[in-house]
């Protein structure tokens, strides 16, 4: 993990688009060249992130997903800022549209086909041992070559063995709790998706 001084960060930030921020500062920036910076703060000095930063976890998860053949962002470099402390991942975003964007924007979308594919994709992830605690339609991307992939992957574990039923059910509970997403889904298709879970 390379040091990132404030001067370099400010140069990047000057021409960047801030995509996400909170009361503690910027969280996600789109740089002028189209790559992204994602910044993670340390919530506590006693936190486990002091030993295994979210940026490093993001990079490790990206490498494992690529090994498994799951489309995801490509990490360019990891950085550490000291003032204020942030672990930073610089990456190429995964091309495509999130399922949330598709539901919002594409009135011709074949939801039946999409959610049949989504059920197969999630089952495939679970069979590969991928437990994605932040699974929702804003983190699943349909790529230009018509594959499903994952973004925002720091909150994920790859267990190396198929997930047990309780973890699969918990993953689906995360997905289903986003009522605004499911409000855009045809209720009949949503019901079929629920029955298709494996």
Image (cartoon, grey):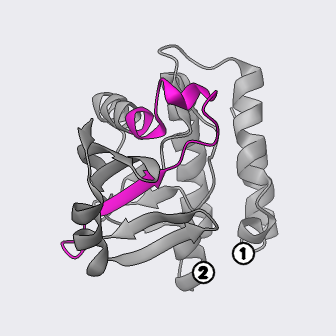
Observer able to see residue 110:
no
Q: Mark 1: which secondary structure?
A: loop
Marker disc for residue 184: 1
Query: Is residue 3 left or right of 190 when viewed as pictured?
Result: left
The residue carrying pointer 2 sits among few (fewer than 14), some (14 to 19) or many (20 or more) residues within 10 Å by Cα, namely few
Whether residue 136 is visible, yes or no, is: yes
Image location (x, y in percent) of residue 15: 26, 81
Instruction: Examine the rendered structure and indicate whether residue 46 appears above or below residue 73.
Output: above
Give the residue at x 71% y 25%.
Answer: 167
- Residue at horizontal 48%, vertical 44%? 153
- Measured as percent of width and height from the top left, residue 165 is found at 74, 21
**Count of numbered badges drawn on the protein:** 2
* Image height of 21 relative to 192, above or below: below
Query: Dividing the picture into quarters, in which one does residue 112 lie?
Result: bottom right
Q: Residues within 10 Å of mark 1 (few under 14, many from 20)?
A: few
Quarter placement of the C terminus = top right
Vertical relation: 18 (above or below) 190: below
State the residue at coordinates (37%, 34%): 65
In the image, residue 44 lies in the stretch drawn in magenta: yes
Q: Which residues are magenta?
A: 31-58
Q: Camera-side residue: 76 or 68?
A: 76
Tell me which corner region of the image, top left, top right, bottom left or bottom right, holds residue 33: bottom left
Q: Are marks 2 and 1 in contact (CB under 8 Å)?
A: yes
Image location of residue 25, percent across then percent down: 53, 66
| First in sequence: mark 2 vs mark 1 | 2
- Say the numbered circle drawn on residue 104: 2
Residue 69 location in percent, x, y?
A: 31, 35
Marker disc for residue 114? none
In three-dimensional space, the C-alpha distance between marks 2 and 1, rounded to whole angstroms, equals 7 Å
The image quadrant where one finds the N terminus is top left
Q: Is 19 located above or below residue 77 in the figure?
A: below
Tag 2's secondary structure? helix
């Amino acid at each position: 993990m390379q040091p990132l001084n404030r001067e370099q960060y400010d140069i990047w930030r000057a021409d960047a688009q801030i995509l996400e921020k909170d009361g503690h500062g910027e969280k996600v920036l789109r740089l002028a060249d189209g790559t992204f910076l994602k910044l993670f703060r340390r919530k506590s000095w006693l936190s486990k992130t002091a030993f295994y930063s979210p940026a490093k976890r993001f990079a490790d998860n990206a490498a494992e997903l690529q090994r498994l053949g799951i489309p995801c962002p490509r990490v360019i470099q990891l950085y550490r800022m000291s003032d204020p402390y942030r672990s930073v991942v610089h990456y190429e975003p995964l091309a495509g549209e999130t399922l949330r964007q598709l539901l919002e924007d594409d009135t011709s979308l074949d939801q039946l086909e999409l959610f049949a594919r989504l059920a197969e994709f999630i089952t495939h992830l679970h069979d590969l041992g991928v437990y994605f605690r932040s699974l929702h339609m804003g983190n699943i991307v349909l790529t230009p070559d018509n594959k499903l992939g994952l973004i925002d992957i720091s909150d994920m574990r790859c267990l190396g063995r198929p997930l047990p039923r309780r973890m699969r059910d918990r993953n689906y509970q995360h997905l289903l709790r986003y009522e605004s997403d499911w409000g855009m889904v045809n209720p009949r298709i949503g019901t079929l998706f629920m029955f298709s879970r494996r």
